[in-house]
Image (cartoon, helix red, strand yellow):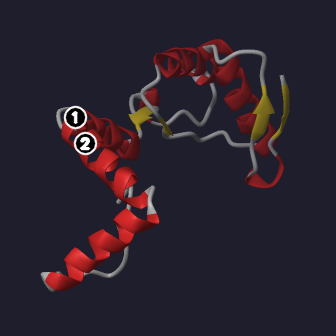
Amino acid sequence: MIGSCKKNLIFFQTSDHKGETISSAIEFCLLDWGIENLFTVIHDNASANDVVITHLKEKIGDWKGVIMRNNYLHVRCNAHILNLIVKEGLSEQNELISRVRNVVKYVKSSSARAASFKSYVEKIKLDTNGLLSLDV
């Protein structure tokens, strides 16, 4: 493990993403920073992170600054959970989204088609702020 925890910047190059390795890196930083009171660790839902928390609890369980017996040490990242929910919801619309994206690519791939599309937009007086966007 190669790492530095100085000035609240963390960078570690590890040989793997195993929970034990990540847990050791977190413990190293906590010790390096002199942190004895740790309430929670927030991370994504990767299964290795469950192992991280299990190992971290074992390593810091006897520290004098353990808060609430580490009952709340493991908190899943809400942004990651929300991202998973949105992806799942969009997965049902994948075919429709792909079709719209293909139409946009088709129109944008030719200056003649783009000009024709623009003329139709102007003809029907569609309020628009610009050209077609592939991703919104």
Q: Residue at x 19, y 41 (%)?
A: 96
| Residue type highlighted by circle 1 | Glu
Q: Where is residue 77 drawn, in percent x and y?
A: 41, 40
Q: Pointer 1: what residue?
A: 95
Q: Answer with left or right where residue 11 lies relative to residue 131.
A: right
Foreground: 93 or 84? 93
**Vertical relation: 79 (above or below) 59:** below
User: Disc 2 to disc 1, how far (Cα)?
Assistant: 6 Å
Q: Where is residue 20 drawn, in percent x and y?
A: 65, 13
Q: Pointer 2: what residue?
A: 99
Q: Where is residue 57 drawn, in percent x and y?
A: 54, 20
**Vertical relation: 10 (above or below) 60:** below
Q: Answer with left or right where residue 97 lies relative to residue 136.
A: left
Q: Answer with left or right where residue 63 lies relative to residue 111.
A: right
Foreground: 52 or 103? 103
Could you tell me if residue 20 is visible in this image?
yes
Residue extending farthest front: 112
| Residue type highlighted by circle 2 | Arg
Total count of labels: 2
Name the front one of labels 2 and 1: 2
Quadrant location, the N terminus: top right
Query: Residue 76 is drawn in which quadrant?
Result: top left
